[in-house]
Structure formats: structure tokens, C-alpha cells
């Protein structure tokens, strides 16, 4: 390994502040040239820019680096922050707290913690062992994948702060209320027996005393883990979005996903449940659907159902929950998502 390469690798540890400043400048500079670069790339191809194929290619060439850059940037920053929010610390913060306020705290923690539906079973078991109430646990498990930093950042980047803020408020409301309702139903008896009978543990955590350089390394580790895991979903979502953008007629999409079709929101939720992806994969599809005349509430209901009610997640949760509790969870969350869809369609 050359001396220059070794120096470059050690730079974040030796001069973390300078590294962060220069990295931010480079990120912003590159982000500004994405659209001209995409247009130039399409122009260099033997394709009419005004054709369906030209529009689809421009969408793909622009959105792919844009979404990947947004995702990499936010995952890096949140990786630095998340070095504080280990599973142990999260359990300790929630354990022993009463419902209501704890539901709000759990849903809020879900925004800044790096857990997704694939973490559902180990997190659920850890929360139960720590004595976290069932409803509070569900508030966290709903919020963590649905109202996470990736979803909010991509919504902000693609649609602006108003849409991102509305999604944040309504998504948190779904997580808080759904968790509270499940808690009020007192359904602990519908945990699988082996989960319910597990010995309780003391929820505690230790301050790691991480330095800024340590947190930068944690940011790099998050990028390797999360971006490395979701990039195929991103490419798939953008490719599908590009096909919708380039080839689907606007009148066709508006006919069954527009505001006038009252049944569009329930249909969107039903369409989303069998799918399995995450915010990074589904938001480019949302962007393309909106550009073709679909109503915002309808496509956001679709997005939320894909993320929070996917069939694979239900299969994973079946390891720790009995059918009746899973059905209750789906019914309560689906009701909240339907409400979000109808509210967005009514006010926008």
C-alpha cells in the first residue's frame, strides 16, 4: 500500500473536523452537477431526448446518483449519531416507563435508530426481556422502518420540507396511536409462549466515550452496511420509476390513483403489503407515480404499507407473535395508513 493511500485512510482519524468540512464541500459540489451530467449523457446517446426512452433514461441517469448520494450522506451522518443509540441503550431508555409518554418516546427514537424490519425479531425479544410494555415496543417497531432518517431525507430532497414534515407528523401519529391501542388491548397472552416466558433482564448501557474520529468511523461502517445492503432495491425502484416516468400515460395513472377515486387509497395499501423493499427503494417509484398524476395521499399510503406492513415482515414476526396479535397489528396500522392517505388527499 502506498504512503499516499495510507495517509488518506488515516486522515479522518487525525484531522476529523477538516475531513468533515472538505467532504461536505465535495458532496455539495458533486450534487450540483448531477442534472447537467444526466442530460449530457442522454444527449451523447443515439436517443431522442423527447421520446419515451429518452425520458426514462434521463430519469434513471439522474435519480440513481441523486438517491445514492442522498442515502450515503444521511446514512453517514446518522451513523455518527447512531453510535450513541445501541440496542442496549434504546431498551434502557424505554424500560420501566409508563405507556403514553413512552409511546411518544419510542416512536421518536425510531426516527434516529438504525433498525429495520429485518431486525424485528431480535429487537422484539430484547424489548420484552427488558420489560418494555408491548404497546411501546410496537410504537418503536412501526416508527423505526417507516419514519426513519432515510425516508425523511429522500422526501425532503425530492418533494421539499413541507411534504417531509407532514409525513413525519402523520407517520409518528400512526406509530404512537397504533402502539397505544395495541397496549390498551392487553394482548400479551398472544405472544408466543417461549417469548412470554423468557426471564427478564436489566436494561442498562455504558457510555462508550467515543471521540469524533470514532464516530466518523461509525459513519463509514453504517454506509458500508446499509448502502451496501439496499443499493439493489434502489436500482430496482429507480428502474421501475423510470419505466413509469417514460412510458405510463398520465391519464392512466390518474384514473385509479387520483383523488377522485375514493377506493385508490385502500387499493394502494393492498398493493403494498405483498411487496418487500425499504424507503430508498420505494420513494423513486413514488416520485414517478406523482409525476404521472397519482394523488400524494394514495402513493404515500402505498409507500407506508410497503415499509411497515410488508408480508415478509409479518412472516418474520410470526416467530414471536401469535396469529391474532399479528392480525391486530396489521389492522391497527393499516387503519392509520388509510387515514394518512385520505388526509393527504383531502388537504393537498
Image (cartoon, helix red, strand yellow):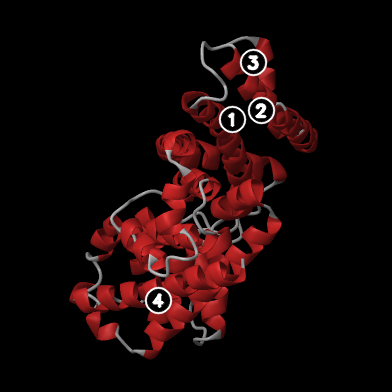
Q: CA distance from mark 3 to mark 2?
A: 28 Å
Query: Circle 2 sits on which residue?
Result: 34
For the residues labelled 4 and 1, say whether their Cβ atoms are less than 8 Å apart: no
Q: CA distance from mark 1 to mark 3?
A: 31 Å
88, above or below 102, in the image: above
Which element is circle 3 on?
A: helix
Measure the C-alpha gap from mark 3 to mark 4. Answer: 54 Å
Q: Within 10 Å of the Cα at label 1, are there few (<14), some (14-19), or many (20+) other Cα atoms? A: some
Mark 1–mark 3 contact, CB under 8 Å? no
Q: Position of residue 255 (x, y in %)?
A: 42, 56
Q: Residue 62 — which label? A: 1
Left or right, 23 with reference to 48: right
> Relative to residue 303, is residue 320 drawn left or right?
left
Q: Earlier in the sequence, mark 3 or mark 2?
A: 3
Q: Tell me which label, 3 or 4, sits earlier in the chain.
A: 3
The residue closer to the viewer here, 83 or 236, is 236
Task: Mark 1 or mark 3: name the one nearer the start of the chain.
Answer: 3
Q: Residue at x 49, y 38 (%)?
A: 245
Amino acid at each position: 500500500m502506498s504512503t499516499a493511500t495510507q495517509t488518506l485512510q488515516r486522515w479522518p482519524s487525525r484531522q476529523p473536523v477538516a475531513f468533515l468540512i472538505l467532504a461536505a464541500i465535495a458532496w455539495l459540489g458533486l450534487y450540483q452537477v448531477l442534472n447537467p451530467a444526466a442530460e449530457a449523457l442522454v444527449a451523447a446517446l443515439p436517443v431522442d431526448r423527447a421520446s419515451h426512452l429518452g425520458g426514462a433514461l434521463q430519469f434513471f441517469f439522474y435519480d440513481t446518483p441523486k438517491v445514492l448520494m442522498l442515502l450515503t450522506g444521511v446514512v453517514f451522518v446518522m451513523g455518527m449519531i447512531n453510535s450513541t443509540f445501541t440496542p442496549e441503550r434504546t431498551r434502557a431508555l424505554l424500560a420501566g416507563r409508563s405507556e403514553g409518554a413512552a409511546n411518544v418516546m419510542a416512536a421518536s427514537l425510531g426516527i434516529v435508530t438504525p433498525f429495520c424490519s429485518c431486525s424485528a425479531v431480535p429487537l422484539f425479544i430484547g424489548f420484552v426481556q427488558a420489560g418494555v410494555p408491548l404497546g411501546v415496543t410496537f410504537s418503536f417497531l412501526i416508527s423505526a422502518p417507516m419514519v426513519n432518517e432515510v425516508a425523511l431525507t429522500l422526501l425532503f430532497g425530492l418533494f421539499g420540507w413541507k411534504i417531509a414534515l407532514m409525513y413525519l407528523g402523520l407517520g409518528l401519529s400512526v406509530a404512537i396511536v397504533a402502539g397505544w391501542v395495541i397496549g390498551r388491548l392487553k394482548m400479551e397472552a398472544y405472544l408466543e409462549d417461549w417469548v412470554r416466558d423468557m426471564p427478564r433482564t436489566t436494561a442498562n448501557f455504558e457510555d462508550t466515550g467515543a471521540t469524533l474520529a470514532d464516530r466518523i468511523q461509525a459513519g463509514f461502517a453504517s454506509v458500508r452496511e446499509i448502502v451496501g445492503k439496499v443499493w439493489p432495491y434502489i436500482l430496482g425502484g429507480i428502474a421501475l420509476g423510470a419505466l413509469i416516468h417514460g412510458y405510463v400515460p398520465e391519464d392512466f395513472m390518474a384514473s385509479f390513483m387520483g383523488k377522485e377515486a375514493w377506493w385508490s387509497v385502500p387499493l394502494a395499501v393492498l398493493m403494498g403489503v405483498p411487496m418487500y423493499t425499504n424507503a430508498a427503494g420505494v420513494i423513486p417509484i413514488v416520485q414517478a407515480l406523482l409525476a404521472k398524476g397519482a394523488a400524494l395521499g394514495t402513493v404515500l399510503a402505498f409507500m407506508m404499507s410497503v415499509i411497515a406492513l410488508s408480508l415478509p415482515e409479518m412472516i418474520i414476526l410470526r416467530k414471536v407473535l401469535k396469529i391474532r396479535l399479528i392480525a391486530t397489528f396489521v389492522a391497527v396500522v393499516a387503519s392509520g395508513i388509510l387515514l394518512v392517505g385520505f388526509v393527504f388527499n383531502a388537504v393537498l
